[in-house]
Image (cartoon, coloured by chain):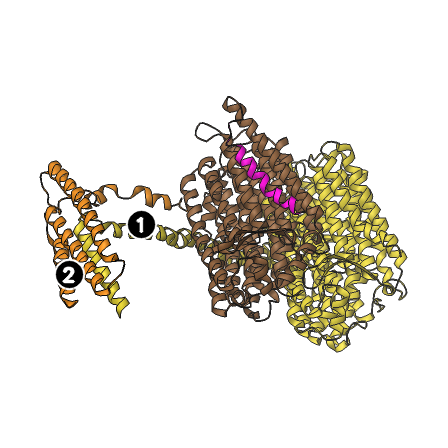
Chain colours: A brown, B orange, C yellow
Amino acid sequence: MNAVLIALLVLPLLGAALTLAPVFGPDRATADRRALRLNTVVTGAVLLLAVALAAGFDHDEPARMQATTDVSWIPALHVRLHLGVDGISLPLVVLTALLTFLCALYSEKRLPNGDTVPSAQAFVGLFLLLEVGMLATFAVLDLLLFFLAFEIVLIPMYFLIARWGSGAKVPAANRFILYTLLGSAVMLLGFLLIGSKAGTFDMQALATAHGSGLSHTTQVIAALAILVGLAVKAPAWPLHSWLPDAHTAAPTVGSVLLAGVLLKMGTYGLVRVLLPVVPDGTTTLAPYLGAFAAVGIVYGSLACLALARPGSKGDLKRLIAYSSVGHMGFVLLGIASLTPVGVNGALFANIAHGLITGLLFFVVGALKDRYGTADLDTLAGATGAALYGRAPRLGALLAFAAVASLGLPGLAGFWGELLAMFGAFDPAQGLSRPAFVTYMVLAGLGTLLTAAYLLIVVKRVCMGDPEQPAPVAEVADLRRYEAVSWTPLAALTLLAGLWPALLLSLSNPAVKHLLGGG
Amino acid sequence: MHLAYPAVLAALLFSVGVYGVLARRNAVLVLMSVELMLNAVNLNLVAFDVWLRDSLHAGQALTLFTITVAAAEIGLGLAIVLLLFRARGTADIDRATALGDPAEALATEEAPAGAEALKGQATA
Amino acid sequence: MNLALPVLVPALPVLGAAATLAVGRKAPGLARPLAIVPVAVSAVLALVVALQLGTGRTLDAATRLTPTGGPDIALALHLDGFASLISVLVGLVATCVQVYSTAYLKKDPRYPSYAALVSLFTAAMFLVVYSGDLIVLLVGWEVMGLCSYFLIGHHWETADARSASLKAFLVTKLGDVPFLFGIFLLAADAGSFRIPDVLAAAGEGRLGHPTLIALLLLAGVAGKSAQFPLHTWLPDAMAGPTPVSALIHAATMVAAGIYLVARLLPVFLLSGAALVVLAVMAAVTMIGSALCALAQDDLKRVLAYSTVGQLGYMAGALASGDREASVFHLVSHGAFKALLFLAAGVVIHAAHTNSISVMSRIPGLRKRVPDAYWTMGIALVALAGLPPFSGFFSKEAVLTAAEHAANGEALTNGLGPASAVPQAAGWIVLISAALTALLTGAYATRLFLVAFHSPTGAAAAPRVLPAADPATAAADHEAGAPYSPEPDEADPATAEPPAMRWPLWVLAVPTMGFGIAGLRSDWLPALLDGGPLRPSGVTAVTGTGLALVGVLAAYGAWRSATARLGTGGPAPAAEVVVADPGRTLLGPLFGPARHGFGVDRLYDALFVRPVAAAARLVRFLDREVVETYVRGSGAGADLLGRAVRLAQTGNAQTYLSALLAAVVLLAVLVAV
């Protein structure tokens, strides 16, 4: 089993190294094609490995770390190469492998190319490096390794945005990397503080200690530093402003991975590091985190509403980016409640958001390809783009994704929001009940506003008079490669919605373990 | 002999050297001031070596070492000053500010690159 | 009892919907059977389940759906008389609607998705009815909301349908958010999401804040069951195809709210305040909607407002503590309202218009659609509450319940003490119900007379055919009132295809006969709580009398208006080209009533504009405030860099001086 997990990390790294070798053929077209094929093969193999890992996972004991490897790496710094997965990280590993594979599949047909972009070889190398970083973030159990993996991700993503993006791509990429680097630096300080005070960077040892041996002040300072660093990544209001720019500029696959995986790294870190390692500090800070989360939910939804309004020149990708701020607010609220219910909800919402927003970005990216713009006003015209009539399958898929995103019961988006709100309704001991009930009410308001803007988007994009003049005469309906790379997301959204135990029975024991209950 | 005499003498020499380095304009004089400071240190080394009765005489050895290094250094320094004089026609150290960051250069560059990179696209 | 049967009831339509969506486009021939058969089988299974269960028994079964870290969520089944009765109604109406739709949307290319959504809608309602777990119930509850959203937006080419669908979803969602919080409160106090556990907790007095819970739940109920003040979506929802209206109004969506309160009535009985609120809500809804119905010109909107009013009756019965009467009225109303809508669909199909004033000028409309004419007449009599049709019996049950509650001897049938119901609630319901009976009689008569019996039709027909005279039609028709042209759905030559005619007569049977079910205590009451449902003397006479007065008043007003029009008398404004008794009866109230008393404007001022303003504010904040500190950090670093640059003069002596100063400073610091 542990060999599978190591192979999961090494395989894409080897693939990335291979792209540096001049083995892809004489002319650029051939080389590009082969490189992209290599990308699909490697990510496909990684997905298979991830599935194997999930299959070999002992589902009776999701709270136990499995597939562990624990060898000394830098003895002077007490850094160990410690890998493993449990019920919290396993779904995220599988989600990451799945999304990268689908993105690779999609980019094989739809890589933005032209004279200005570098070769596909470079793309594949960066893409695989990105996958290594993302998978490693969820698989490592050492604070410094976690930081390392967290940082590895930034570089490829920076280049994906800055080289393969559109619009104001370089400023957006700069802002992305500076913002997140600043956050990570603060986070590193927190890690170092914990490491120096506790004498180890090992997450499991720290989690077992559950904060004993760390004074309250240390815990609060460390928790604050880590919280700020991870909140930038999540992103929590008001540290979100890199996200809309990055999403607007990023290529489709970049957006999908950014929303689907990168944001999850922040919330995963909160659950994995903050809750078990510095519990006292977290309890002190949780009400503030909850407040920022609740404000973020409403704020994100209102920002989306402002963008969705006719005449506001709203960009669809930007709108979905803001909707991510709202949705991640639910995740943060669930975590802030510090109850098993809330944290379970947060983890579920994490996965659900990855699936649904991934799908949304795919669909919107396809729209942008077809129309040449994602500007809502241009798309909709006076009455609406009438996608139901002009490209029925695409329209139906967009409506499905929107409906899932607004948290319709029976689809994946619902359970996370429900449990996060239920967690906030009855927060852990030591937290102010009235404050959290207020947050819950705000979150409830947020669900209403979320429904409003998503349905307005559906109204303006899917509905409308098919007779009105449109910017593009013929809109191609769902293409084959699009259907292939999107259907798994839609199917999983439905599956997770109908059978939430799939994820919750994995995360529940692990969460209770982390919270110190068992 | 009491240790105070060489120590005070060394301190005075050093102070004269510091004054020369900081206040003289001519590069040759600045170099000479540096020599004064070095020799103040040498004096201290020798005096303390005697006072401490060091069996290895590390202070004296180090003094010899310093004298050698100082000779090399003054050679190099004078060569640089000579080149400077040939190039500029002056050995005035106040004028040799080519490595500085003059105010007019600040005005012309006016930070387009650095500031723009941070400014993202205007939001919303 | 075999659990597979009740599980299949909601599952079959879901599978049918999936199959319809999957093959609908490729094999249009299969779409119709795939739409009808699963729903019909489900209806039969629902009947079988009801028969197997019999009277006076309940069935509870559960399996864990998922752990949550707190109370588990269970896939639970809770079957009792209420559930089986309503599931049979749902099955019957849904089957009729599916059969009817095959003809009504014959030429519609979007029929497969439509049929799939109707099936899904039916399944969701079955889920609500059968579920024994509040969260699973909520799933069905919201899926219904979504299906209604899509179905109302079926004609998405038209602006009305687009905005009506959005409005329907958002207004019901506005109620669903507090509803969810109510469920949280219930579950937190009871320690479980299961309905039997919740009811047990209510019985043992373990609920901490019954009034708060009840009020929060009521918000959701008001949204779904279209009670004041969340009723505004329902009249606008008429932009959807007519069969959908029948489905929404009769058996599914709006019934869900009433059903939920009936299910959780023991919780409501713990709070007198909540019952009074419910009574006031019901009273305002009843009277307001009846007045609105009297003034509408759109046939479907009249029926929509009448639905709102009849739901008010049901809510009133619940406020009186008698869920039996409420569900009795729910079922009989379900039958006759479905009939009314389906018949209205036939009429609209034939007349090419929704406007009754335009219909009144079509010659011989009633002869072109005889079945619809007769069945509509039957259903309207039932609606007005005249004996011997079902509406009379069920409405009497409501009045009796209210009367008992007003006397302080509420018919709670053992769910709680009679004193749990405040007498005020009874009085409020009783008075408003009596007043509404009068108004209902009036608007039912007006609808029938204006649509089918206008003498102007014969006189004016040769020159003003509505299709040829859009100006008149436009003048009659409210500007801004939703109006669905349904262009692809009408073919006057075959105004009543069999697939549309048969469902009418099938539904006419319960409309005429179902009321008798309440007469004997071992029939319907035995299935429900066991209380009597027989009409009692005083209320029966009063109610019928008031309804008759309403009918006669409308008739009289219609006669005089017709006479005035016939003599070319004082027709005050150009648009009064038909004899509308509503105008005479309502007088100055007519204008406001026609526009729903401006509730929409209230919403606009209370919700829409503040939210839009908040959105603008956020946009401003994001662009100016959040952005400012982000840019500020960049600019700050830049300024710092410039400050450091200033020190870089190039003068080595300056550097050395600074160095020396720093060394001295450090030396002093270390020494001291």
Q: Residues within 10 Å of mark 2 (few under 14, many from 20)?
A: many
Q: Does the magenta stretch include residue C126?
A: no
Q: In this view, does A245 lie to the left or right of A424?
A: left
Q: Is residue C17 visible?
A: yes
Whole-number angstrom distance, CA of label 1 to CA of label 2: 46 Å
Q: Is residue A47 left or right of residue C12?
A: left
Picture disc at residue C638: 1
Determine the residue positioned at 66% across, 40% down: A48
Q: Is residue C638 left or right of residue A92?
A: left
Residue type at mark 2 is Ala
Q: Is residue A17 magenta?
A: yes
Residue C215 place in picture, x, y as percent = 64, 67
| Residues rendered magenta in the picture | A1-24
Task: Give the quarter of the image for residue C61.
Answer: bottom right
Whether pointer 1 and pointer 2 mark residues with C-beta atoms closer than 8 Å, the reply is: no
Using the image, determine if residue C172 lies above or below residue B100. below
Q: Is mark 2 on a helix, strand or loop?
A: helix
Q: Quadrant of the N terminus of chain B?
A: bottom left
Output the chain of dot 2. Answer: B
Mark 1 vs mark 2: give the one in front.
2
Residue B5 place in picture, x, y as percent = 13, 66
**Number of numbered labels in the structure image:** 2
Task: Give the quarter of the image for residue B105.
Answer: top left
Residue C518 place in picture, x, y as percent = 85, 63
Residue type at mark 1 is Asp
Name the one closer to the observer, A155 or C208. Answer: A155
Name the one closer to the observer, A331 or A5. Answer: A5
Residue hosting label 2: B10
Determine the residue positioned at 39% across, 55% down: C625
Q: Residue furthest top?
A: A26
Q: In this view, does C407 lie to the left or right of A371?
A: right
Q: Is residue C556 visible?
A: no
